[in-house]
Amino acid sequence: MPMTVETRGDTVIIYAAEADSRFTGRLQKSGKALLGTWQQPGYKASMELTLAPPPAAVTKSFKFPPPYRVEEVVFTNTLANIRLAGTLTVPAGKGPFPAVLLLSDTGPQDRDGTLEQYRMFGLLGDYLTRRGIAVLRYDDRGVGQSQGSTAAATTADLVKDAQAGLNFLRTRPEIELTHIGLIGHGEGGNVALMAAAEPLPPAFVVLLAAYGIPGQDVLVQQQANIMRSVGMEAAQIDAMNKRQQAMMEIITQTADNTQAQAIVANMLRQSNTAIDNATALASAAELTTPWYRYFLSFNPQSVLPKVRCPVLALNGTKDLQAAPETNLTALEKGLKGNRDVTARKLPGVNHLFQADQAEWAMVEGKLQPSFSPVAQETIREWIIKHAKLEK
């Protein structure tokens, strides 16, 4: 969810407009903790946020040279006139090799999909490259060494970035031209499907928790699932969903952005009188960006009948952001005209495709989150099968 952060002297206010929730805390003398209160409709509790620097073990990750070639690359989206920087990893040997381009979920992310000590794309890229599949992963617009701005880009704009990446791979002699695919996570999965529905599609698509229902429904379900997971009662969740749907209706039906922001800000203040005008306006601006507007109106079902390449769709049973009961089912329904679709639910796997904690590795006495081994091997096996490289 979009969040705004405001500082007033030694006080920090973090506000999530969609969930009508906020944390207000005061910086402690140590400079390493915020002590305050978390508040949401029907629930209020004391909370302490503490500074948690990444453990030293993170800096040691992938320190030793891997058994494959690593190249820093740059490719260009000529339509947007921006350069995107990434890393191409190529298996040892002569080749040519099948290849995949990794597409990230919502928001600005680096080429490794880094979230604290977890590197989703770094781990997946390493696993696949060690097993005969070349991988290109890149920094999103405005992240790392890539140009542009993620905030100003819609999902449709990101499709052009993906197509630029595919064309770059098609220029490489070590890549097998007929076996270049896309692996998309969350919104990245929808980017992959949209690219597959256009001319010069990828040879195959792998979906990791992609959305199969309209954007408005996705956001409502995400809020409900998260609130349910923290014990909120059904009546409270229903009331929050109604407020959220009313706000989204205003955004989609009000073309004038200034007017839409004013109305949304007023709705936020009326639903929570503790919000000041500046915070409400900042939250309204987040909720009326080009990306947010496009996402609200986008329905994946309009694209799915045009996808003819093979598709592997995976979802974890612990996913609160793209629940398989609705999204995976909707994807299967929309792709029913495609003769080569495989859909699987992975027990115990969350939205980040992390395995159950019982399967995490222990590094220097601490559990390190890991990409689900079952998911990794399912992806590898399916790609190799469709690249016709079985021995």
Image (tube, rainbow, N blue to C red):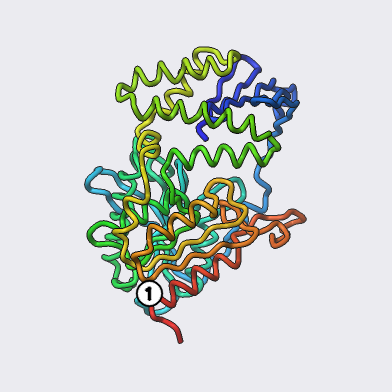
- The outermost residue toward the front is 235
Q: Nearer the viewer, residue 100 or 199?
A: 199
Q: Residue at x 26, y 65 (%)?
A: 171
Q: Residue at x 65, y 17 (%)?
A: 10
On screen, residue 116 above or below 231: below
Left or right of 66, for residue 251: left
Q: Residue at x 47, y 15 (%)?
A: 266
- The outermost residue toward the right is 365
Q: Residues within 10 Å of mark 1 (few under 14, many from 20)?
A: many
Left or right of 252, for residue 12: right
Which of the 4 image quadrants contains residue 287? top left
Q: Position of residue 80 (x, y in %)?
A: 25, 43
Q: Residue at x 62, y 49 (%)?
A: 117
> How many numbered marks have been drawn onto this rendered protein structure?
1
Do we see residue 104 in this rendering? no
Secondary-structure class at tag 1: strand
Q: Amino acid at mark 1?
A: Phe
Q: Position of residue 205 (x, y in %)?
A: 39, 63
Q: Nearer the viewer, residue 233 or 73?
A: 233
Q: Position of residue 58 (x, y in %)?
A: 63, 52
On screen, residue 390 above or below 368: below
Residue pointed to by mark 1: 97
Left or right of 249, for residue 195: left
Do we see residue 321 in this rendering? yes
Which of the 4 image quadrants contains residue 26? top right
Q: Position of residue 354 (x, y in %)?
A: 61, 56
Left or right of 354, for residue 296: left
